[in-house]
Image (cartoon, rainbow, N blue to C red):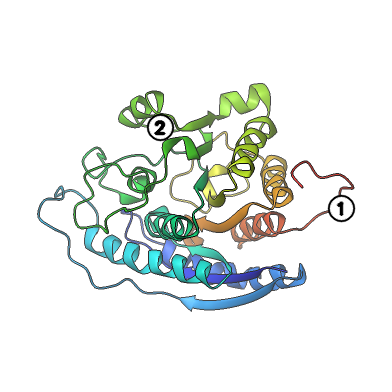
Amino acid sequence: MTTCFLIGAPVDSGKKRRGCLMGPDAYRVAGIGEALSELGHNVKDLGNLSPAPAEAPASLPDHLVDPAETIGWTITLAEAAETALKDGGLPVFLGGDHSLSLGSVSGAANHAAREGRPLFVLWLDAHSDYHTPQSTSSGNLHGTPLAYVAGEPGFDGFPDVTNPVPQENICIIGLRSVDTPERETMQNSNIRYHDMREIDENGIAKPLAGFLEMVKAAKGMLHVSLDVDFFDPSFAPAVGTTVPGGASMREGHLVMEMISDSGLMTSLDLVELNPFLDDRGRTAQVMVDMAGSALGRRVFTRPTRAYS
């Protein structure tokens, strides 16, 4: 049995379009606590957090959207991640836009370093989110978390990244919308990235299996960050960054069940749910179902597990 800490992160400062602050409560209404409890987990809902007081230094670009609030959220969520992991639980961050991962991942990395273990990050997203404050043309900081946790420069005023995640420990699956500066960075990096063409050609299981084997061999901790726009918007429309051609329900459940089979996941983000854009709560339910699959829900229990 796992103790799952539900951590509400109503972060809405990472982009111009509002609505993600309603995400945490939408997950609760969709029954995430009950779903995980029914799987035998001990569920503790810690409520919704608030950002720490913070100021944005003048050295940050002027066009950034709400940098001070995002800095405050990063402080709060890093502390929450460290505390939950130190207490032996599996934090589930109920977002909130993807800028929440500046805090959730950096906090998980700090904990992993104290445990003497490497942190690995599985990024399920249509976007690479590897902008810096200087490279983003939109000013939306929800497009920057991977660059931040990997230790890229330019994040003045944010907490120092004392335990950067090595590029080779990052795997992005589902890419189909990548800006030119990010594309150049990806192609010159050690990040593992798999776009939808590759998935269409070769399937989604092979690259994920290879990454999970690497995590297991390193005795690593695994942070999974699931963005609503990983999925095709035809059945998961409640996101402000819809990109057609995303993962199907079957692919999503396969990914989550493989994660569960591996037994490697130690923290989870559910991000970018904007209930204002949803259709009678169906996207929230999709995300709750995916969380359930990542934490043990099955149609049948497989007699042989690939990552036991």
Q: Amino acid at mark 1?
A: Thr
The answer, for residue 176, to whether it is visible in the render is no
Q: Is 25 drawn above or below residue 194 in the view shown? A: below
Q: Residue furthest left?
A: 58
How far apart marks 1 and 2 lie (CA) works out to 38 Å
Q: Residue furthest front?
A: 116
| Label 2 SS | loop
Which mark's residue is nearer the viewer, 1 or 2?
Answer: 1
Label total for image: 2
According to the picture, the residue beneath numbered tag 1 turns out to be: 301
Q: Position of residue 294 (x, y in %)?
A: 68, 54
Q: Going 34% across and 25% down the picture, which residue do you hit?
A: 184
Q: Which mark is residue 178?
A: 2
Q: Amino acid at mark 2?
A: Val
Q: In this rendering, would 236 be left or right of 178?
A: right
Q: Which mark is residue 271?
A: none
Q: Quadrant of residue 105?
A: bottom left
Q: Going 25% across and 57% down the picture, which residue do you hit?
A: 158
